[in-house]
Amino acid sequence: GDSVTQMEGPVTLSEEAFLTINCTYTATGYPSLFWYVQYPGEGLQLLLKATKADDKGSNKGFEATYRKETTSFHLEKGSVQVSDSAVYFCALSNFGNEKLTFGTGTRLTIIP
Amino acid sequence: GAVVSQHPSRVICKSGTSVKIECRSLDFQATTMFWYRQFPKQSLMLMATSNEGSKATYEQGVEKDKFLINHASLTLSTLTVTSAHPEDSSFYICSAASGTSGRDGELFFGEGSRLTVL
């Protein structure tokens, strides 16, 4: 079945550092890929998405490119802020349905 | 964005009792709601999909008599953990889709409910 693997955390960075959170997937067909973020005390929120190969999703300074050849969707940000501290989940949906398959989540902490 | 609220956020119960968790869409009508379970350091596991007015569809390995799901209205779904045991202790999360939003992956999530069974 479909699966998502993302780097284990926790990840701790200093403010303004470069961020990469790796995500790879296994799926049949042509899945859509997502990054969700969960801030402390809140529900998961969609951060960005890409629906086909080579698409780049971007939002709030975060970017991720759908790489079919490496089955990856790594999350990047050039300069992180304290307010980016959260848990980040990589996910996919397949066959155009609403079911999401999630990775384990990566806790990110940014230190001033 | 749309708001989904779960209640209670934390619940502690004795073994053998039943616990109900509510999931409400506050500012939109949710045609479909999903219930997930998350174990420590593991990914969210989809338990079931509920559509308003019809029976829930359970994922393989999830006991439907153990985890009762009711989606009685377009704004409310409930998950009842029946005869709870310590192994049912977990973090339960609901999400909701409105119309076609879910097909683009933009589900709206509740804050989660942590269940501890003593």
Image: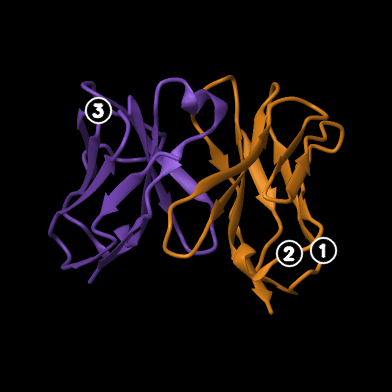
Chain colours: A orange, B purple
Q: Which residue lies furthest to the right in this view?
A: A69
Secondary element type, mark 3: loop
Look at the numbered discs 1 and 2 and tell me whether their residues touch, using CB distance below 8 Å: yes
Q: Residue at left 26%, top 37%?
A: B64
The answer to whether residue B108 is above or below residue A85 is above
Q: What kind of residue is marked 2? A: Val
Q: Mark 1 lies on which chain?
A: A
SS at mark 1? loop
Residue ID for mark 2? A80
Q: Residue at x 48, y 28 (%)?
A: B102
| Labels 1 and 2 within one chain | yes
User: In 3D space, how far apart are the residues under numbered discs 2 and 3 (Cα atoms)?
Assistant: 39 Å
Residues B65 and B45: in front is: B45
B37 vs A40: above or below: above
How far apart in space, not on screen, are marks 3 and 1 (Cα)?
A: 43 Å
- The nearer-to-camera label among 2 and 3 is 2
Q: Position of residue B77 (x, y in %)?
A: 24, 37
The numbered dot on residue A18 is 1
> Residue B96 in the image: x percent, y percent?
38, 35
Q: Is residue B24 left or right of residue A94?
A: left
Question: Where is A79 relative to B34, above or below?
Answer: below
Residue at 65% from the left image edge and 40% from the top image edge = A48
Q: What chain does badge 2 belong to? A: A
Q: Name which residue type carries label 3.
A: Leu
**Which residue shows up at 68% across the image and 78% down it?**
A111
Q: Which residue does the numbered mark 3 point to in the structure image?
A: B74
Placement of the N terminus of chain A among the 4 image quadrants: top right
Tell me whether circle 3 and circle 1 mark residues in contact (CB < 8 Å): no
